Image (tube, grey):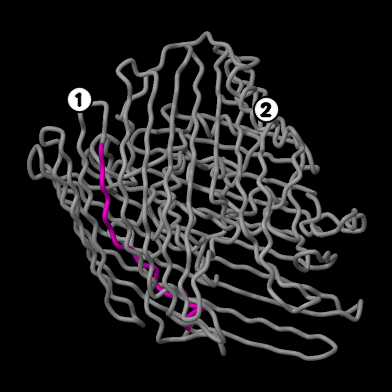
Amino acid sequence: MKKIFTCFLLAATSLVALAQEKKLNLDEVSVTATKFSKKSSETGKVVSIITREEIERSGGKNINDLLNTQPALNLNGANGNRGTNISTYLRGAPSGYVLILIDGMPVNDPSQISSEYDLNLINLEMVDHIEILRGGHSTLYGSDAMAGVINIITKKGGEKPVSVNALVTGGSYTTFKESLGVNGSLGKFDYNVSVTNEKSDGFSSAKDTLASKDTNSNFDKDHFHLQAASVNLGWQITSNMMFRPFARFSKTKSMIDYGAFTDDKDFKGKSSDVAAGFSSNYKLNAADFYLNYSYNNVKRYFLNDSIPRLGEYSLSDMRGELHNAELYGKFDLSEHFEVLAGTSYRFSNSYQISKYISPFWTSESEMTPDSTKSTIASAYASFFLKNLAGFDFELGGRYNHHSTYGNNFTYTINPSFLIDGNTKLFVNISSAFKAPSLYQLYAPIYGNASLKPEKVQSYEAGFQTVFEDGKVKVGLSAFKRNGKDVIAFTTHYVNYNEQKDEGMEVEGEFLPYKGLTLKTYYSLVYGKVKTQNATFNNLYRRPRNTVGLNAGYKVSDNFFVSTNLKVVGKCVDPFFDTNTFQTVNLTLNNYFLLDAYAEYKLFKKLKLFVDLKNITDEKYVETTGYNTRGFNVNGGLSLSL
């Protein structure tokens, strides 16, 4: 505790102030809460925004690092070796309960057991800002939005005919990244093109965290390589019509260890995502119409070729396709009444083949896209009462038809009340669902085509307030999430579990001096699952308590510094003991991570920066049997022309 207190003191008092005035308010605009632009003061939903300015001050970070600093979010694996599998826990919910959007369109991996998308494939340099919507929001977004939505909004065209941005970084673990972006506007057209190359020698992903002495001296480094490119185009066809086609490509290559505690020198993996589509908007009097389409082709390939060492041979080739089409409209019926209505269609399929050979036995399985497929067709509508003497209200419903399980319905009731323009009270009652994944439905031996969707009933209440001088902003939100028909694995996949989770978040933002911003949060979550035989805590690798503090100070127009502290409480991690052939629940100790960042503009267009992580070289465990980063540094330069 003494070390933690010292770090808080350092982060809070090591900065002095001298920069331009800033005031806090409830006027922050997001699109994710309602699918159209709306001020925070006009909706009763909880949204966190990672701004473009914050992303530009994250040159030494990747998207997992950035998300892992946000309230209610814990990304297990983000502090491991680059390329580690990421589990995104929002409000303590399983990773598959968070819907990932890119520019409002869903992305997932139909070949995954829970369909979750690999965040390692997302290049931070293409991102303009990120909106994080907490709570169950299937009424607006359909399947998977059980605990929240992360909307990654990409960069679009610039104001000048041609602008160039270049980034070069290097640092610990022999990590290097180069990125180049070109954007601009030419009459009715705009464009944004970016390419990124990142390489890291890394360190061994596996580590024997139970050993009393170092047993890892012979463990080899597990390298990682990311290549990514994106193209965003815009065409203002008429004054009322906008058309935006896009294309993205990313691929990763990495070395992988055999598993917890176990090194492997010839286990290779590679992943890729090819995406294309368009968004469009047409304005007609008091109505806005949107037509969006996206296609994702995700591939994962893993090869462990150990035959030369008389060991095992395994191969997994997994591919998934996702088509998503959506048409919706927003109608301003009066000064105080808005309507959102639309339809969506999702089609996904998967091809998977796996082979295993050992001196003792062999196996092979295959899933083909002809039989491994599903569709979801939906119609939805939401009605918004807007600023009626400070009162706002949303009532919405969504009807879904799934090709396997049939029909289901979700709803949202969301009243909020704004007092004196600076205090918002809100309540959110909603239902949400997650459709069974293709693997859960159709996997050989384990699949179950009779699965129903997982369902949750969510309750949320809280407030946000800004003090009159605009120097302090405080918020509290408490939630309860009741799940049923939770899919579990026995000898195959079945619906029978019930899940009950609850918690809260307390957040504060302070402007004690000119140019100095302090942000802090506390997150609490606990839950239990009820099976046919027992009731127990199953929030594995998800801490009950998390505290965050960020201090940023603009010393001058050219110089900015910040520190970030995250304190992670104890959690439970199950692992299989190969000596006793029993699963043992281990308690992972609490830990804290202190980071720092500084940037200096040598010239108006050239910036130098350095990013220090885990300054105290904290020793900790996120997942039993796997390594975490010690003290590490990344630095570089950014050029804008």
Q: Which of the two residues, 247 or 126, is positioned nearer the viewer here?
A: 126
Mark 1 surroundings: few (<14), some (14-19) or many (≥20) residues within 10 A: few
Compared to residue 80, the image places residue 550 above or below, namely above
**Percent x, y of residue 632:** 76, 37
Q: Amino acid at mark 2?
A: Leu
Compared to residue 514, the image places residue 167 above or below, namely below
Q: Which mark is residue 619?
A: none
Q: Quick check: 125 left or right of 461?
A: right
The residue drawn where x is 60% and y is 86% is 366
Outermost residue to the top: 18
The residue drawn where x is 70% and y is 40% is 177
Chain part drawn in magenta: 425-441
**Percent x, y of residue 94:** 50, 62
The quarter in which the C terminus is drawn is top right
Q: Which of the two residues, 60 or 6, is positioned nearer the viewer here?
A: 6
Q: Amino acid at mark 1?
A: Asp
Q: CA distance from mark 1 to mark 2?
A: 45 Å
Compared to residue 561, the image places residue 242 above or below, namely below
The residue drawn where x is 51% and y is 66% is 109
Q: Quick check: 458 left or right of 72?
A: left
Mark 2 surroundings: few (<14), some (14-19) or many (≥20) residues within 10 A: some
Q: State the residue position of label 1.
A: 420
Based on the displayed image, in which of its 4 quarters is residue 430 positioned?
A: bottom left
**Pair 1/2: label in front:** 1
Q: State the residue position of label 2.
A: 637
**Percent x, y of residue 363:** 71, 89
The residue drawn where x is 53% and y is 34% is 55
